[in-house]
Image (cartoon, helix red, strand yellow):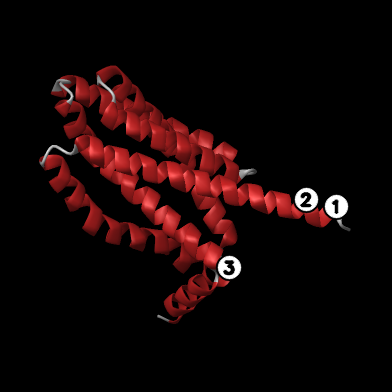
Amino acid sequence: MTAIKGASRLASQDAALLLLVAIGATVATLSTINNLYAQAMLQHKGISLTVIDVLISLGTGIAASGSIVGGHLAYRRRRQRFGSGLIIYGLAMVAIGIFPVTEAVSGYLLGSGVDGVIDPIYEAELNEKAPEEYRATILSLPGAGFSLGMMILFPLAGWLMGHGLWVSVYGTMGMALFLIGAMVLLASHRKKSGQTNTMSTK
């Protein structure tokens, strides 16, 4: 209990760490909603269940391969790569909702791969930012936020899609990922510019 209180207090006092935790929880929630409703979404676009099963299996394999790639990319320039990945993932998710079958399938497979890539990059960044004393507890916070997000957003997304608002749901989720990615890239650029200016004045 002491560790939980200490980690929560640390996260609340460190705005950057708290934001990183919130981003992880949000991305995990939106990604999971996409994965859980992928079959229904593709079926809504007229794809047979047999083909959908093949696509989902293929997407799972692509995501696993992406995780391996992400593990190799997690050693440097993590923020830039994480932000860029979120932007691509967001656009892919928008494509799933807006475009016809071919583009939607391409968006699903691309999104699966990018999702796999950004996961180890995010985990490496959070692991580095979390103080060693509270690291285990802090690493669990995105999972807690994910659970809360799923309790609220998963049934909401299902209800909206049940009323035919497929495009709105996927468009909103995709734009949210896109904006988060753009925010991460902007923050990374500002930090890099600040470090450059500091070095130039020494």
Disc 1 versus disc 3: nearer the observer: 1
Verify CB contact (< 8 Å) between mark 2 and mark 1. Answer: yes
Callout 2, which amino acid? Thr
Query: What amino acid does circle 3 point to?
Result: Pro
Which SS class for mark 1? Answer: helix
Which mark is on residue 200? Answer: 1
**Mark 1 Cα within 10 Å, few/some/many (few <14, many 20+)?**
few
Residue behind mark 3? 131
Q: Residue at x 40, y 28 (%)?
A: 110
Q: Position of residue 148 (x, y in %)?
A: 28, 61
| Disc marking residue 196 | 2
Mark 3 nearby-residue class (10 Å; few <14, some 14–19, many ≥20): few
Q: Name the mark on residue 135.
A: none
Residue drawn at x 29%, y 57% is: 149
Q: Position of residue 128 (x, y in %)?
A: 59, 57
In this view, the residue in front, 21 or 3, is: 21
